[in-house]
Amino acid sequence: MGCACEAVHGFPCQFLDETEFHAFDGREWCLFHLPLEDAEGNKSPKDSWERSVPDWQRFRNVVFDSLRHPQDKSPNRWIEHRISDLRAVVFPHRFGFGLLHDTILYPDFSYATFGVSTIFSTLKFGDWAMFLEAKFAEEARFSGTSFGNWAWFAGARFGEDAWFRNAHFNDSAQFESVFFEGLASFSEAIFDGNASFGKATFGSVTSFEKATFGGNATFTGAAFGDKASFMNANFGRLAAFEAGGADERRGLFRGIDFQQAEFHGPVNFENRRFTSATSFEQAVFHDIAQFHGCTFHQDMSFHQTDFLKKKGKNDGETAKLERAYRTLKLAMENLRARNEEARFFALEMECHRQLGDVPRLERAFASLYKQVSEYGQSISRPLVYLFVSLGAFALLYWITGMLTNPWLLLVQGQFLYDLAILTLEQLVKPFSVWTRSSSSAQLSLVKSNPLLVPIFASFQSAFNLSLIAVFLLALRRRFKMD
Ligand SMILES: [Zn+2]
């Protein structure tokens, strides 16, 4: 006679002092490993335990005693590793742990099963809170719970809503391959270390609103439901959201929201398929944002999104940034999103301009293009430069006149009029100063400086023509329909 724990779970039952066993599902079980139901859904007596039942009380006393007195399992005296071995224990429904609010818990709940509504809210866990492959039948509450250096939930299964609102993970939070059937709320949760949700499966609603990730946040291959929000979330380091693998369902993003999220480290969305509205409105990317291989949706918004990184530590990194912006530019081009396309083109050009192997002349023109029109994004800036240049060249002609023929000013009113003619004619009839019949050529200022003034005037004509060209390009880009 003994508990079926070893046969079922592969390790000996930790409740060796038990003498009473319960027959269920063709096996004998100790009070703690006795399941709630069998594979066919037939209920065991534990399923209907009330708090007044002596078994319930004995169960609770033993479990609480174990949690209050964790055993030191350290392999050596340098590492503290205390543990309350509650592996594979099956908890009755509505089992609360609230009475343990004054204790730091060091549980190993691996393979444990929790009944309907389990509450760990506001409790405090020490290092190594183990919930490996644990099963939560329905609601599980960890709101405001504090975890020590490691919180392991890998492979756990949440049958309904899981509340981790305001939870604080002091270091690593391991949620790989975890399964959420219903709502998963990590709103305002704080992850001080790495948080791994790789290959996790989320239910219909997921919230990481205002969550703070101090370390790497990994969601590689995670499958999301219809609504997932990372609004106002703060990613301190890497944010990995790539599809990771060929599984169609895992590559999908059905409705995901990153409004006002802040990404301090590199971001990776490679090979994801955005199949409905996705918002990055007012999000801030401090580092590279990689969207290579993604499928974009028409209702994808980058409105007022800031991409701050324009230069890497070396040429390799800068070229990588350039490619990342090019991918976004091409995506926006395919969606005919002209303004966004222009923005990503400008970012791509800005990265390219800073590459070490770009010829100097090309860089100089790129710098000029950036200065006068933000790489074709600004319509007003070339016009402002045009008006400023008119004043600047008029001043240049005035100085030239003053230095070469000071008596010109004595011709009352005539000199200022001449300056206006000379400056404006270069705008409407470029290079006409070289034609003898033009008005400019007749001016006494030009006659007294037959080489110098025409050379300046030619520069003005060339500069004005470039600004007009840049202005028309920007205008066409903005209003082009195709
Ligand atoms: Zn047992």
Image (cartoon, grey):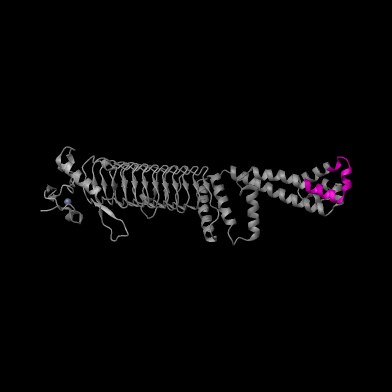
Task: Inspect the magenta stretch and tell me whether residue 423 lies in it.
Answer: no
- x then y, percent, for residue 442: 86, 47
Is residue 274 visible in the rendered image? The answer is no
Q: Is residue 181 left or right of residue 467?
A: left
- x then y, percent, for residue 60: 20, 43
Q: Residue furthest left?
A: 1
Q: Is residue 109 left or right of residue 57?
A: right
Residues shaded magenta: 394-415
Q: Quadrant of residue 77?
A: bottom left
Residue nearest the viewer, comparing 145 with 423 = 145
Q: Is residue 247 left or right of residue 71?
A: right
Quarter occupied by the C terminus? top right
Residue drawn where x is 12% and y is 47% of the image: 22
Residue drawn where x is 65% and y is 42% of the image: 380
Q: Is residue 410 left or right of residue 3?
A: right
Q: Quadrant of residue 480?
A: top right
- x then y, percent, for residue 437: 84, 48
